[in-house]
Amino acid sequence: MKTQNAIRIVVAALAVSSAGLASAQNVTGQVVGRVMDAETGKAVAGATVTASSPGWIDQSVKTDATGYYVLSLLPPNHYRVAVRAPGYTEGLARDVQVMIDWRIKNDVKLLSASAAAGRAGERVAQNR
């Protein structure tokens, strides 16, 4: 009787520990970062950050009030990460590699549309 109870306790303990191991396994990764204004260094709140990869559904999130974002549950793959915000040019990171259990940091500095137009004008003036 004592042996049967001991066996039941061991089996129950193994079942509980196995369940914990199974739930701890992660098969995805994350891309995290902060979106900032390239000129002022201030956070860009409400920017849309999109991870896309051929054969996979795009995943988009918005930056919070401090410019931070987290793209989570991304299967291992190579991603293109695009950042869009009103009044700014698009930020783009190509070939962001996500691996299982990796947390990839991808900070982005966006150039305001007016600053980008000014820089384009500077280039034209320099080419004369």
Image: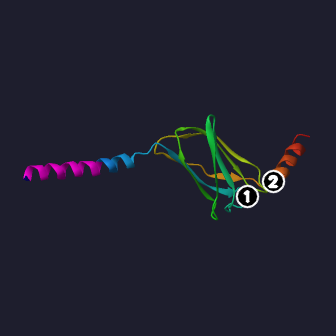
Q: Residue at x 85, y 52 (%)?
A: 118
Location of the C terminus (image quadrant): top right
- Start-end of magenta stretch: 2-17
Q: Nearer the viewer, mark 2 or mark 1?
A: 2
Quick check: 74 left or right of 15? Answer: right
Q: Residue 123 sits in which quadrant? A: top right
* Kind of element beneath mark 1: loop
Q: Position of residue 103 (x, y in %)?
A: 50, 48
Give the Cα distance between marks 2 and 1. 12 Å
Disc 1 marks a residue whose amino acid type is Glu
Instruction: Return the residue at label 2.
Output: 113
Q: Residue at x 89, y 43 (%)?
A: 124
CB within 8 Å, label 2 to label 1: no
- Judge whether 85 appears above or below 52 on screen: below
What secondary structure is the stretch in magenta mostly built from? helix
Quick check: 92 left or right of 87? Answer: left
User: What mark, if any, has residue 39 been given in the picture?
Assistant: 1
Q: Residue 51 sits in which quadrant? A: top right
